[in-house]
Image (cartoon, rainbow, N blue to C red):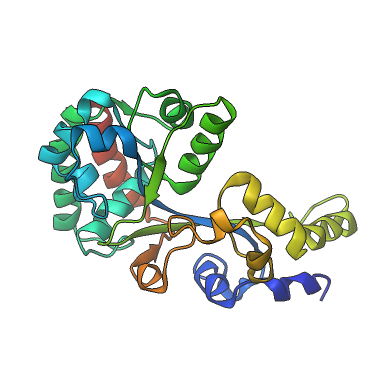
Amino acid sequence: TRLPGRGNLDPGLMARLAQYDPGNAHAVGYSWGTVGIGYDAGRLHELAPDAPTDSWRLALDPAVVARLAGCGVSVIDSPTDVIGAVLASLGFDANQPTAQQLQEVERVLLAVRPQVRKVDASSQINDLAGGSICLLVTWGTNVQVARARAREAGVAADFRYVVPKEGSVAWFDSLAIPADAPHPAAAHAFLEFMLRPDIAARNANHIGSATMNAAATRLMDPAFRDDPGIYPSPAQLEKLQSLRARSQAQSREENRIWSRFKTGQ
């Protein structure tokens, strides 16, 4: 093989990636993560000290979210991720829901919408780091980056990220070489460089996500490696569903639900 470093990749994660890339024929696993809940622990303790921080109720139960609405609630503007996570939270298949299950997701989202300040993908990191939101449905990496930015600014913030106990969805980033790449030898050399354990560990530490490179895990910053928000426990992993491509009909229905959620109508 032209990429001997592929042997460093986690077989279990590559099996999940094979749902998109049968036989792992084309994609090289890079990083992975989850959709979950981020929150400012200090502000949450002030406003709702008994809030269920291990459960989707923290972000999807209108009675709980209403107590935190004053300090700002944000939902990532990513319909497939959020709708998939809500399906998982309800115990449904995140990839092939029934029409009735999608209706239940719509009900859940619209019920909490009045308490949501922003449905946004571009400003969540700065909003959390800057204090204009305190609760967010997001990718775990956003919380890690916000934590780093607050630290750089000298702000003593306690930002946390959890994968709720009911389950959620996982995402995977991978690298591939286009069929018509003008310099395939250089591209293979770059991928082999990225597959080095020391390089994979540096990348994971920098972006605040889990690496798919099993040989790199021991080289990571222990603060990341031992964080269950980045590396879920085996029990949590069992409850993580890997998102797959949507059919046109399902995409249309999810986009319709998302349009209603974003506009609040």
Which residue occupies the foreground of this view, 14 or 245?
A: 14
Point 27% across, 60% down: residue: 88
The image quadrant that residue 13 belongs to is bottom right
**Residue 52 percent location from the top left of the image:** 20, 50
Q: Is residue 7 left or right of residue 47?
A: right
Q: In which quadrant will I find the N terminus?
A: bottom right
Q: Is residue 191 above or below residue 117?
A: below
Q: In which quadrant will I find the C terminus?
A: top left
Q: Is residue 45 above or below residue 23?
A: above
Point 81% across, 63% down: residue: 192
Q: Is residue 93 left or right of residue 177?
A: left
Q: Is residue 133 left or right of residue 214?
A: left
Which residue occupies the foreground of this view, 243 or 132?
A: 132
Residue at far left of view = 63
Which residue occupies the foreground of this view, 9 or 163?
A: 163
Q: Is residue 196 left or right of residue 84?
A: right
